[in-house]
Image (spheres, helix red, strand yellow):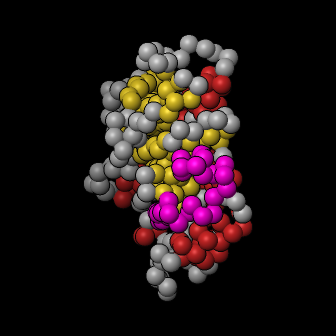
C-alpha cells in the first residue's frame, strides 16, 4: 500500500486547490471553499458507527473543489477532492470533548494522513503548468492556422468509499489525473486503520501466516484472470504475487485488491479490482485479524 501511495505522490498533486474568475485580465488565485458532508450510503462513503470507549466514530467527506481559468476565459484546470475525515461523538451526539485521550489520538493520526490533500501548497505550481501548456497549445494552433477548440484542461479528482467494523476503518480511494494528455490516469488507493492500536496497518498484519496468506490470495486472484488474456502483462503472475503492495481495502463482501492503470494490464483495460470473499480469507486470519475484521469469537 505504501508503495502505491509513493507512486501516486510522484504522479499527481496531493493538495487542495484554488480558483480564478474567467474575466479579462488575469485574476489572482483564491482558495476554494471547504465543505463537509457526512456520507449517507454504502455506495458513497457509507456511515458506520463504532463504539469505542463510549465514543461513536463516523467517516465524513471533506470536499475541496476549485477551478482556474486563463485571462481569456479558457478553462485551465479543475480540481475536486473528496477526502475522508474521521469524527467522534459522545453518547449525546456532541463532538468528542477531550483532546488528550485515545479518541483524540485516533482523530489526529487518521486525519493527519490526509491533510496534504487539502493543504493547497502545490496548487500554484500546478496552475502554472496548466497555463504554460495552454500557451504552447495556442502557439501551435496559430502556426497551423487551426480552428480547433481548446479542450485539454487539467482535471484532478479524488473520491472514496469507507467500511467500518468496531475497530477497523477501511478506505477505498480512486484518484483521476489528466494533465493535458490524450487520456488521464486512474490510481487506486487503499488505507486500513486500527482504532484500538491507533495506527494504519497493512493487510499481512491480519494473517496467522503471512506467506501462506499471500500465496492463497494470489492464487484466488489468478483464478479470476483468463489465461492468455492479451491485455495482461507477460509477468502478471509475478505482479499478482506482490498484491499486498497494491491497493487493499475491505467492504461488505470481503477484501478487495486493486491494481491501477498500467500496473497489471495495458491502459485500455483500465484499473483491475479483485474481490476476495470473507469466507475465503477467514481460515488464514490470526486472532488479531479475526477480531479487527469483526468475526465472531
Instruction: Residue at the far top: name it.
Output: 97
Write the residue at 60% across / 59% down.
Answer: 246
- Residue found farthest to the front: 297
From this view, report whether residue 140 is shown above or below residue 86. below
- Residue 14 is situated, as x and y percent measured from the top left of the image, at 56, 40
User: Does 101 sit left or right of 95 as displayed?
Assistant: right
28 relative to 284 in the view: left or right:
left
Q: Residue furthest bottom?
A: 228
Picture coordinates of residue 121, whole percent (x, y): 59, 30
Q: Residue at x 51, y 52 (%)?
A: 250
Query: Does the magenta portion include 284?
Result: yes
Residue 239 spot, x, y in % from top left: 62, 71
Instruction: Please identify the quarter of the rendering in which residue 264 is found.
Output: bottom right
The reply to whether residue 184 is in sight is no
Q: In this view, does 4 lie above or below 269?
A: above
Instruction: In the rendered view, tell whether residue 101 sits above or below residue 266.
Output: above
Asked whether 198 or 228 is in front, the reply is 198
The structure residue drawn at horizontal position 38% and vertical position 50%, both measured from the top left corner, is 152
Residue 58's place in the image compared with 193, above or below, is: above
Give the extent of the magenta segment: 271-297
**Is 217 covered by the magenta stretch?**
no
Amino acid at each position: 500500500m505504501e508503495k502505491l501511495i509513493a507512486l501516486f505522490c510522484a504522479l499527481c498533486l496531493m493538495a487542495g486547490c484554488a480558483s480564478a474568475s474567467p474575466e479579462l485580465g488575469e485574476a489572482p488565485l483564491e482558495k476554494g471553499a471547504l465543505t463537509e458532508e457526512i456520507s449517507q450510503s454504502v455506495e458513497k462513503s457509507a456511515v458506520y458507527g463504532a463504539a469505542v470507549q463510549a465514543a461513536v466514530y463516523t467517516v465524513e467527506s471533506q470536499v475541496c473543489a476549485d477551478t482556474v481559468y486563463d485571462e481569456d476565459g479558457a478553462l485551465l484546470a479543475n480540481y475536486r477532492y473528496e477526502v475522508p475525515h474521521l469524527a467522534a461523538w459522545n453518547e449525546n451526539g456532541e463532538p468528542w470533548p477531550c483532546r488528550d485521550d485515545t479518541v483524540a489520538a485516533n482523530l489526529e493520526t487518521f486525519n493527519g494522513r490526509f491533510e496534504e490533500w487539502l493543504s493547497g501548497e502545490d496548487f500554484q505550481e500546478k496552475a502554472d503548468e496548466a497555463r504554460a501548456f495552454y500557451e504552447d497549445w495556442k502557439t501551435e494552433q496559430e502556426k497551423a492556422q487551426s480552428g480547433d477548440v481548446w479542450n485539454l484542461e487539467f482535471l484532478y479528482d479524488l473520491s472514496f468509499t469507507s467500511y467500518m467494523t468496531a475497530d477497523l476503518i477501511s478506505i477505498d480511494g480512486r484518484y483521476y489525473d489528466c494533465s493535458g494528455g490524450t487520456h488521464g490516469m486512474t490510481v487506486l488507493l487503499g488505507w486500513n486503520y486500527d482504532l484500538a492500536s491507533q495506527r494504519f496497518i497493512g493487510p499481512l498484519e491480519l494473517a496467522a501466516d503471512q506467506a501462506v496468506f499471500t500465496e492463497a490470495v494470489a492464487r484466488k486472484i489468478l483464478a479470476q484472470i483468463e489465461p492468455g488474456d492479451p491485455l495482461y502483462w507477460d509477468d502478471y503472475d509475478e505482479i499478482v504475487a506482490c498484491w499486498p503492495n497494491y491497493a487493499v481495502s475491505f467492504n461488505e463482501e470481503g477484501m478487495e485488491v486493486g491494481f491501477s492503470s498500467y500496473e497489471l494490464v495495458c491502459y485500455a483495460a483500465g484499473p483491475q479490482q479483485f474481490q476476495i470473499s470473507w469466507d475465503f480469507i477467514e481460515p488464514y486470519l490470526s486472532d488479531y485479524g479475526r477480531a479487527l475484521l469483526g468475526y465472531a469469537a
